[in-house]
Image: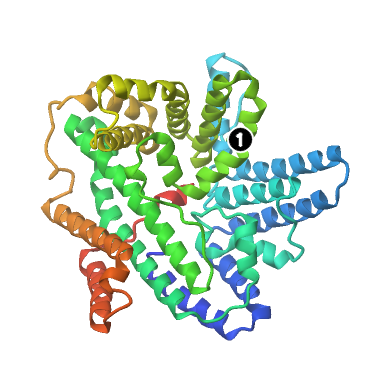
Amino acid sequence: MPFNSLDYLLFLPAVYLVFYLAGDHARWGVLLAASFGFYAALKVPYLPAVLVLVAVITYFFGIWLHRAQAPGAKRRLLWGGVAANILVLVVMKYLPFLSENVRGITQLFSLEFQVPAVRALVAIGVSYYVFQAISYLIDIYFEIEEPEPHFGYFALYLSFFPKLLQGPIERAGDLLPQLKSPYRFDYDNMRYGMLLFAWGLVKKMIIADRLGIYADAVYNDVHAAGGLQLLLGTYAYAFQIFMDFSGYTDMALGTARLFNISLTRNFNSPYLATSVADFWRRWHISFSRWILDYIFKPLQMQWRDWRNWGTAAALVAAFLVSGIWHGASWGFVIWGGVHGLYMACSIFYKPYQKKIYQALGIQKSRYLKYWQMLVTFHLVCFAWVFFRVNSLSDALYICGFKFLSAGHRTGSLLVHGFDRGDLRLVLAGGAVVALGGWLSRHERALGCWNGSVVLRWGCYNALLLALIFLGVKSQGTFIYFNF
């Protein structure tokens, strides 16, 4: 049941109506039932069962961790709970990948042992709630949080439907208190949530899905494309994935706000970052915080005797985990490794950065920031190649001379179905999003959202008309549904 589907647009008001009519003592049950119904609507029978399994495992390990007194017992319980959750994730998501690579190794060394092929399982949303479950156990272990005694509230914390499939990855201390708070109708929350949801639809249907037409055409047949097409296809994908994922996040945050729940902001203009480290402070923020707190910092402390080399190694390891989390393929692993290398190199480059700028006489230049943004954007785009490609051979082809040269079939932006009409609609949609972002930052000055009724409803109607006349009519799948 994607957010951009008619089913969801019927499902959400029905859930809200039942939620509103129910008393505070029953509202958690309404949201929990809606969350499992939302997950079951994917029509993959074992997925709700896996969610229940993760919830039960984590709930009881959390209680046992809290009751344990001996440090050794607590450590064993922590690793037991983490291992159980990781096992669920591996079985659901990584068995085919592991089977294929082990089989390749046995064939390489001509071993008699045969590894059977494993059927791929659908793992939509599993990565998100497994990571959330692991953070819950770690926070209890370090006594940052206490275990939730009410299983219903805990299950809702893991499965709350707006963030179930693509996050944000919420911490228990942020979300659980909100789920327990008595509900009071708030007009401002309702209006803000609906506007945020509509913004997400604009990003998805007008920008991301239309950019996807060109990016998919180029990346699905890279050998037929020239250098310019490959470059434009990479740019198209960079903005497609941003608009797609941030659009989903806006819709998730907007949905949650209808219930007076504030989820974590997941994006902050990532393509305006002035370094790769700054990019990761702005992109998929809840996931970046998770990787920082639960992978990088422990490894950095473990390897602190190695000084900068230890920090660099911890960064590479953390981003390799990030790549593996995104999917069971070598493309994702390399994407994570590339970002890890970027970050590791910055550790050694940073002490010399100011000296280089001073030597070039640009340390006070007003254009330096724009140069840093341009370099960072292209470093990120290079890594996106490995994230998007269908195979490593395609990635090597794109990163070869074809990517840097005009090639023998450069073509134009009009090939592969990305015609002038598509281009106009992308530009129009981009203008709508840019205008909306500007208005949201200057709403008090302009009074568009809080001032004149005529002006306010004019903006609402413009948003609706943009969706009707500029949106791609087919329901494109959200990219991060695969993770």
How many marks on residues?
Answer: 1
Across and down, in percent, residue 216 comes to 28, 44
Q: Residue at x 37, y 45 (%)?
A: 270
Is residue 132 in sight in this rendering? yes
Furthest residue toward right = 70
Q: What element carries label 1?
A: helix
Q: Is residue 145 left or right of residue 200?
A: right
Q: How is the image coloured?
A: rainbow
Position of residue 468 relative to residue 265, above or below, is below
Residue holding disc 1: 297
Q: Give x and y (percent) for residue 170.
A: 57, 55
Q: Locate residue 34: give its quadrant.
A: bottom right
Residue 336 horizontal/vertical position (percent): 46, 33
Image vertical order of residue 201 relative to residue 405, above or below: below
Crowdedness of circle 1 by 10 Å Cα count: few (<14), some, many (20+)?
A: some
Residue 461: x percent and y percent?
A: 25, 76
> Can you name the residue that lies furthest to the bottom here?
21
Q: In this view, does 431 lie to the left or right of 33?
A: left
Residue 360 image-quadrant placement: top left
Q: Residue at the spot x=48%, y=48% of the render?
A: 285
Nearer to us in this view, 78 or 365? 365
Task: Give the residue drawn at x 68%, y 66%.
Answer: 153
Seen from the viewer's position, the closer of residues 287 and 229 is 287
Viewport quadrant of the N terminus: bottom left
Disc 1 residue type? Lys
Residue in the foreground of this view, choosing between 2 and 360? 360
Residue 42 appears in the rendering: no
